[in-house]
Image: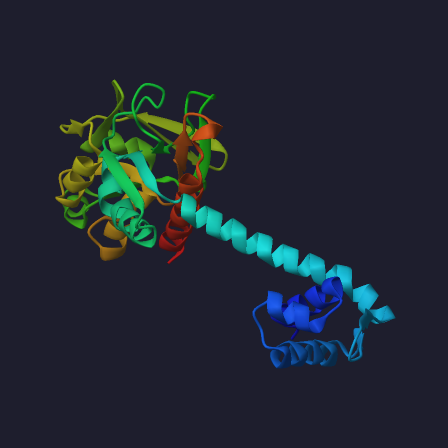
Amino acid sequence: MVRLDDMAVFVRAAETGSLSAAARELDLSPAVASAALKRLEAELGALLLVRSTRSLRLTVDGERYLDHARSAIASVTAGRDAIAAGQAAIAGALTISMPSDVGRNVLLPWLTAFQAQHPALRLQLRVSDRITDLYRQPVDVALRYGVPADSSLVALPLAAINRRVLCAAPSYFARHGTPKVPVDLRRHNCLRQVLGDQVHGRWRFRKDGEEETIVVNGQHSCDDGEIARRWAVAGLGVAYKSRIDVLADLRAGHLVAALTDFEAEETPLYLVCAHRQSISPAVVKLREFLAEQIDAYLHG
């Protein structure tokens, strides 16, 4: 394989007209520079420079190869500089708003790992299910379920394919029965979540191209997704939660999914910024990191 250092010796020798001068510029001994050039020529199977005690000139093959060598060195150097610049830019403060349940139970360890990779970065976390006003509040990015209602916001997908899951504790279904069709939910204690100023009490399902909306009721409602999940795990009722939020409980058997023959509501997860100028190198890296973690989590 051709070595970049060997190409650098060839290019500088061709440009200076002297192998000794190239060696001095590259801080190499003449013997090392000569060995590098011989190694390159052997790898290419061609003589690149004709050398004598007083002069050095390019061969026809050397002239053909010179521009390619220059381009290769420039490309690798540019790539190295781009990575260095990106890593150097991952610094300062980054304020992140996120929903309570997924924030505490799923995202927190990932964000801790991300910060460990970039120790110059200071993360400020705001955990709440209330929608943050990105224009008025000092928040750089928000993690949100669903497409933002404000089309002027920039929404970068983290989990574009994610749906709700109807679920409850095994003990709850043992006492009250498992719903077989959406209308069965009318006789269940549904754990409703307050989103903004409204109670999310209209649960939608789809099967065979037909959508069915059920108005649900129950004894419990809250504006905190973590509380709704805990109520469900405690066997107090049926929850209709993002799969990301309850996946660990489903895998552990703390919760059991129902109405799996029906397609539940879409609830994609986005990283949202107020404008494109907010997408700093730190935000780009964060989005890439979280997208990888979520994909592995969902398909693990």
Left or right placement of residue 116 versus residue 74 in this view? left
With respect to residue 176, does 154 lie above or below? above
Residue located 71% across and 63% down the image:
69
Q: Nearer the viewer, residue 102 or 92?
A: 92
The reply to whether residue 227 is visible in this rendering is yes
**Residue 4 placement (x, y as % from top left):** 62, 68
* In this view, 45 is above or below 73: below
Q: Is residue 158 visible?
A: no
Camera-side residue of 48 and 203: 48
Horizontal side of 293 relative to 251 (left or right) equals: right
Q: What residue is at 33 percent from the left and 39 percent from the top?
A: 92
Depth order, front residue of 23/136: 23
The image quadrant that residue 135 belongs to is: top left
Residue occupying image coordinates x 30% and y 35%: 96
Q: Nearer the viewer, residue 229 or 41?
A: 41
Image quadrant holding the N terminus, namely bottom right
Total marks drawn?
0
Residue at (17, 27) in percent of width and height: 221
